[in-house]
Amino acid sequence: MSKTVVHTDQAPLPAASFSQGLAKGGLLQVAGQVGFHPDTRTPVGPGLREQIEQTLRNVGAVLEAGGSGWGDVIMMRVYLTDTGHFAELNAVYDAWFAKVLPEGGHPARTTVYVGLPAGLLVEIDALAVTG
């Protein structure tokens, strides 16, 4: 079973040596996405909400390029830089999923706190099924 590299210009190019996504055996792993605008490769807005929404748009673009979608996501990992951002993350995340999955069924999720490059407040990756 071969691996398929997933690439889209609708999400920012990786800043290091990794693929935006990789599919194999009916699974698609979307690499960690951040709140960079795909065209400028700079963070959107100074606020957490703007960065979360852009990050989710970037994840969605890689999902789509890999032949998957929000309803196929089984696991998401969220990386925040500040424990004080947890409540706002949940509010934005819940609103996002109410829009893309109105029938419910949020993916499983883990949230951890990490250091990210200057100006970035959140990173999100996703694991989805394909086909």
Image (cartoon, grey):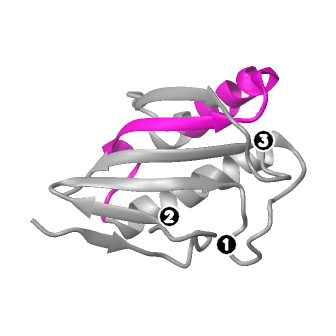
Q: Position of residue 56 (x, y in %)?
A: 59, 50
Of residues 116 and 44, the one nearer the viewer is: 116
What residue type is disc 1 on? Answer: Pro
Query: Whole-percent x and y of residue 76?
Result: 46, 37
Mark 1 highlights which residue? Answer: 38
Mark 2 burial class by Cα count in 10 Å: few <14, some 14-19, many 20+:
many
Residue 93 belongs to magenta span: yes
**Mark 3, residues whose alpha carbon is within 10 Å: few (<14), some, or many (≥20)?**
many
Q: Is residue 27 magenta?
A: no
- Residue 54 higher or lower than 61, as above or below: above
Rendered image: mark on residue 61: 2
- Which residue is at a point 59% across and 74% down the rendered structure image? 13
Quadrant in which residue 52 is drawn: top right
Amino acid beneath label 2? Ala
Is 67 in front, or is 6?
A: 6
Residue located beneath label 3 in the image: 49
Instruction: Name the residue at 38% across, 28% down.
Output: 105
Task: Give the magenta-colored segment's residue range.
Answer: 67-96
On-image quarter of the N terminus: bottom left
For image coordinates 71% across by 23% down, the residue present is 86
Q: Is residue 73 left or right of residue 17?
A: left
Q: SS at mark 3? A: helix
